[in-house]
Amino acid sequence: MRILLAGGGSAGHTSPLIATADALLRKASDVDITCLGTARGLETRVIPDAGYRLELIPPVPLPRRVSLDLARVPGRLRSAVSATRAIVERIEPDVIVGFGGYVCMPAYVVARRKKLPLVIHEGNALPGVANRFGARLCTDLVATSFPNTKLPNGRFIGLPIRRAISTLDRAELRALAREHFGLLQDAPTLLVTGGSQGARRINHAVAGAASDFAAAGVQVLHVKGPRGDVPLGPVGAGQVPPYVVVPFVDRMELAYAAADAMVGRAGANSVTEAAAIGLPAVFVPLPIGNGEQALNAAAVVEAGGGVLVADADFTPDWVRRTLPGLLLDSARLHSMSEAAGSLIRRDADELLADMIIAAATR
């Protein structure tokens, strides 16, 4: 059984792709997986690192507004479709699966022309351009991460996440996780992350309240991003309880296990992973795009499992007024954890893999 998985550009596309590929390997011994991406995205690193074969095609950015770039789309699409068709004719997949992003539009066009089975997974609550197009071609195998996503024939299954996270027992791993990051074992712990690239607004707002966390007895694990900065100053850098800053985390399950609550953006991965493991979260959606991040977090926030704060409102003042008190309120944290953990499925990787296998063998 040969399967082509298309998705790239950001962790929002590559993470569920890899989680689904892993589930396919667990379910089918004869599966042969090829991934489709572009040279622009982080798929050039994370997909080969996960052990999967990667084929590259030219990117086809899809502008959301009328611009000169919009006029260039037809030519770029023709080039990308031609490259995708050559790959498809060479590997002869039984099914094509799309996770959204630049790489998916040509894959959907080729699937239609070749009359190949097509499975689509939409990661965000608000569908992207490529998946809105693909869903019109795909009559019955469209999966969504969130229950209110509007796509033709969409079926809510959740977002595929890695088994290391979907099977995580935070309490069982907590002592090891805190030791790993050099944290105290008995202090309330806040995890701060801006996603794979960090977030300047989050970094500076939380760092600006470092002394307030120390005064409250709260320690901080701050993942700043590879190019981010966290302006602590000499006092914050050596404070007790500690304020630990790391550029990135390879084993995110350890960071989650160390934390009693987290602050982060509201990408589909962040929302799903935090909710699935019952980690109370403060979501600070990106202030750009179509508002999809706020929609991603909406169900968790409405259920009481998270707090939503506009990017412009997330200031050092807001942080010092709100977060130390939240970390010290164990009853509220427990209530938030219960609300989040009961909302999000942990088995979306298995469900999507079953859909793909059914399409390939139909």
Image (tube, rainbow, N blue to C red):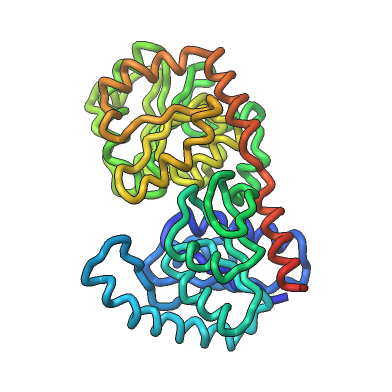
Viewer-nearest residue: 304 or 132 = 132
Q: Where is residue 39 in the image (x, y as percent from the top left)?
A: 39, 71
> Which residue is pictured at 39% across the width and 77% down the height?
58
Q: In this view, does 155 lie above or below 211?
A: below
**Seen in the image, is 251 located left or right of residue 143?**
left
> Which residue is pictured at 33% across the width and 20% down the height?
239
Quadrant position of the C terminus in the picture: bottom right
Viewer-nearest residue: 239 or 16 = 16
Q: Position of residue 106 (x, y in %)?
A: 47, 76
Q: How many numbered tags mark residues here? A: 0
Quadrant housing residue 334: top right
Residue 34 visible in the snapshot: yes
**Seen in the image, is 17 located left or right of residue 285?**
right
> Which residue is pictured at 68% across the width and 41% down the height?
167
Viewer-nearest residue: 256 or 57 = 57
Viewer-nearest residue: 157 or 255 = 157
Quadrant housing residue 148: top right
Q: Where is residue 99 in the image (x, y as percent from the top left)?
A: 53, 62
> Which residue is pictured at 25% across the width and 65% down the height?
66
Q: In this view, does 51 lie above or below 73?
A: above
**Seen in the image, is 303 located left or right of residue 163?**
left
